[in-house]
Image (tube, coloured by chain):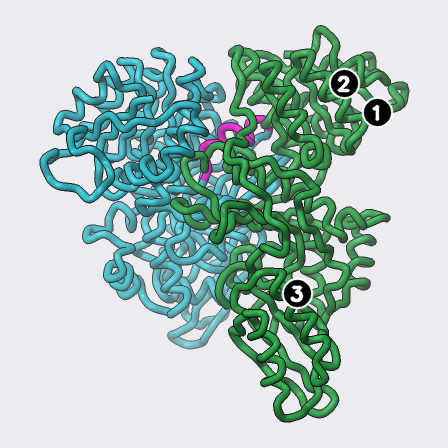
Chain colours: A cyan, B green
Amino acid sequence: MRIALLGCGVVGSDVVRLLHTHAEDLAARVGAPLELAGVAVRRPSIARDIPVDPAVFTGDAAALATRDDIDIVVEVVGGIEPARGWLLAALRAGKSVVTANKALLATHGAALYDAAAAHGVDLYYEAAVAGAIPLLRPLRESLAGDRVRRVLGIVNGTTNYILTRMDETGAGFTEALEEATALGYAEADPSADIDGFDAAAKAAIIAQLAFHTRVTLDDVHREGIGDVTAADIASARAMGCTVKALAIAERSVEAPGVSVRVHPAMIPRAHPLAAVRDAFNAVFVEAEAAGQLMFYGRGAGGSPTASAVLGDLVAVARNRLAGRRGPGESAYAALPVLPMGATVTRYHINLDVTDKTGVLASVAAAFARQDVSIQSVRQDGHGDDASLVLITHAATDAALAATVEELRELDVVRAVASVMRVEGGEL
Amino acid sequence: MRIALLGCGVVGSDVVRLLHTHAEDLAARVGAPLELAGVAVRRPSIARDIPVDPAVFTGDAAALATRDDIDIVVEVVGGIEPARGWLLAALRAGKSVVTANKALLATHGAALYDAAAAHGVDLYYEAAVAGAIPLLRPLRESLAGDRVRRVLGIVNGTTNYILTRMDETGAGFTEALEEATALGYAEADPSADIDGFDAAAKAAIIAQLAFHTRVTLDDVHREGIGDVTAADIASARAMGCTVKALAIAERSVEAPGVSVRVHPAMIPRAHPLAAVRDAFNAVFVEAEAAGQLMFYGRGAGGSPTASAVLGDLVAVARNRLAGRRGPGESAYAALPVLPMGATVTRYHINLDVTDKTGVLASVAAAFARQDVSIQSVRQDGHGDDASLVLITHAATDAALAATVEELRELDVVRAVASVMRVEGGEL
C-alpha cells in the first residue's frame, strides 16, 4: 500500500514517525506494508529530523495526490483551499483519503462524500473531531442500531483550559487566556478557539454522524466564551454547576429536526462532563437504548491526532487490499436543521434590580407573558446591590430572547447582568 | 437480511423491540430490511409481550442456527454449552454471528474465530464487554495504528456499585452487598460478580483486542472483592485514593509479554476512573501516541446490551450485503501471558505492629532483602494499637509475596492486616 502524505507539520511528522516505528505491527494488521511513497510540503529541500528518505519530498501536492502509484492520500494541511481541490482530485483518481481537516469537512463535506461514493473509495476522518478520541466509529457504527437523542461535547481544548482555570482560581477571562497563551494552549490569534469556529466545525461533523443528516458549518449557531465572566463562574458554582463551552447536537422532541450549536453553558458538577478539565476533550452521548455514554481523551496535539490518522489508515488500507469500501456517508434521515430560536433549553438569568416591593411580581409577569416557566428564583443583597437570579424550565430560545427584551424595559430592572443556558439535566 | 435470534430473555426481548421500532432506520442504514426470521427459546408456546409473529418461535435452536434461509445468527443465551455448538455450526454453515457471550468468547474464542475465518463470515461481539460502551471498534480499529500500553477497566457494575456504597457510606462489604441485592444490582448468587469471574472473562477479551494476542479465561489472574474491608476503604481515602475492582491488561516493559488480571486496587481520586460510580462501567486506555482515553457508559441491562447487539447486526448485515467480511481476529503478536508473580505494580500494606524502638528498621530490612523499595511509611497509634502503613515503589508480585511471608515471621509484626495493589499512576 503506497501512501501520499500532504503536509508535514506537527501532525504530519508524527504520522511519519508512527509509520516508521510501528512498520512491522502495521504490516501485520493491514496484511501488507504501508509504504510512504511521497510527502508534499511547501519547501521540499529543507532538512527534516524525521525517519524518511529525503527523495520522497515534493513541492507539488496536486501532482502527488493523483500520481498513479499512490493508493491512499493522507491530508494534514488543514484549511479549505488548496486542500479541497487536492482531495477532490485524489478521490476522482480513485485514491482513498484520510483527512484531519474539520473545516473542509464541515464546509464541503457533501462534495467530498459524493466523490468518494462515485469512485468507490473511502473517505475517513476520525482525526477531524476530538483528536485521538474514537468518535467516528462509535457514532457511525457502534450506535448504528440505536437512535441518538443528544450529543454534548467539550471539543476544544483551549476554551476548556481557560474555563477550567477560571473555575479553579477565580481568574477573569483575560487573565486565564494570557495563562493559556503562555503555556502554549492558545494560539497567538486565539479567535478560532475563543469565538467557537473550531468547535462549530466539529459540531457539524458530529451532528452529521449522529443524525444521518447533512449539516454544514453555516447551520451551526455559534457563541464564543469571550463574554463569560468570573461572576458567571461564581454564580454557576453557587448553584452546584460549572461553566463549559459545549458543542451540542440534539434531536428535537417537538418536531422532526435537529439543533446544532456551540455556546458556553452551565452544567451540574455531578455531570460526567464537569470532571473533564484542562485541555482534555470529551463527548457525551445520550442514545435511546444505550443510555449515557462518554468518550474522553486528548483532543489535540501531534501525537494523539497522528494516532487517529493511523487508525484510519489501517482501516482504509485493509479495505483497499480486500477490494471493498468501509461504511460511507449516511445522510438518509435528511432532518431539517432548526433555527436557534426554535431550540429548547433552560436558562440562568442574573438581573440587577431595585430593592422595592413588587420587583419579583413585575419580573415574573414578564416571564409569564412569554410563556417561559420559572423553576427557581433567588434574591441576593439589598438596596442598590440587589440581584435576582432565575432559572427557567425548558423554553425556546426565541421566547427567552423576547423575555429578556421585556425585562430590559422594566423600571425595576437596572440591567440584565447575564443570561446563560443550562444543559445536562436537572439541577 | 434474515436474522435468527437464539434466546429471548431480557436482552433478546429488547433486541426484538429495537428491530421493530427502528425498522425503517435500520433498513436505511443497512441498505436492506432486517427481518426476524426465527427466535429460538426453551418454551416456544409461551405468550410473550413483544412485537413479533408468534409463528417464528421455535424450540430447536440447533436447527434454526443452520437453517438455509438464515443470514445472521444473534446469540443472547449466554453460557458455554449449548451456545458453543450452535455458533460453531452456524459459522460452518456460512452464517455471520453476533454474540453477547463473554464466557464463551473468553473460553473457546479461538475455535470460533477460526471457524469464522475458514468460512469467510463475521464474528462480532461488542455486547460481550461493557454492554453499550463501544470498545471492540475503538480497540480493534481506531487504535490499529497505535500501540496500547495498558487498559484499566471497571467492567462489572455489581462490584462497582458495592465499592461505591462502601466508599460513600462507610458501610462494610456485607451490608453493601445486601443493599445491592435489594436494589437488583446483585444476583441471588452473586459469586460470578463478587469473585471476579465475570470481569475475568471481559479482561481476557479486552487483552486479546488490545494486544493482538490470544488470551483465555485461564490466563487471567483473578481476585474478588469479598475481602475488601471498610478499613481498606478508609485507608485508601486517607491517602487520596478510592478502591475499585479493576480488570487490567498491560504490556510488560521488562520482557515481551502481557499481564492480565482482575483484582481490587487503590487508585488516586483524581484518576478519571475514580469518578465512575454506582453501576456504571468505564474502560481507561493508555496508548503510546493517543495518550489517555476513557470510554464510559452502562455496562449491563437489556436495553444497553441490545443497543450494542444492534450496532453489530447493522455492521454484519452491511458486510454481508456487500459480499465482504469486517476485520477478523488479530492475534499476530502472540505475546506470552506472564504469570502473576512476574507482574509489576505497587502495593499498599497495612501492618499491626508492636510499639517498640526498631520496628521500622526490622520491617524495612525485610523489604530490602526482597529488593522491594518503599515509597512512603506512616506510623499510627501507639502501644497495642500501633500500625504501620507502607506504600512500595513498583515491584513484582513474587517479590511482594515473599516480603509479606517474611513480615509474617517478624516478632515485631503482630499481623499483616491488609495488602492491596495501587494502580493508576503516582500518588
Residue B52's disc number: 2
Tag 3 residue: B401
Under mark 2, the amino acid is Val
| Residue name at image x 86 percent, y 18 percent | B59
Q: How dense is the environment of label 1, judged by Cα within 10 Å: few (below 14), some, or many (20 and up)?
A: few
Q: Secondary structure at mark 3?
A: helix
Q: How dense is the environment of label 3, judged by Cα within 10 Å: few (below 14), some, or many (20 and up)?
A: some
Under mark 1, the amino acid is Arg
On the image, the x and y values in percent for residue B144 come to 45, 34
Magenta stretch in the rendered image: A134-145
Q: Secondary structure at mark 1?
A: loop
On the image, the x and y values in percent for residue A320 come to 40, 18
Q: CA distance from mark 1 to mark 2?
A: 9 Å
Residue B48's disc number: 1
> Quick check: B367 left or right of A193?
right
Q: CA distance from mark 2 to mark 3?
A: 57 Å
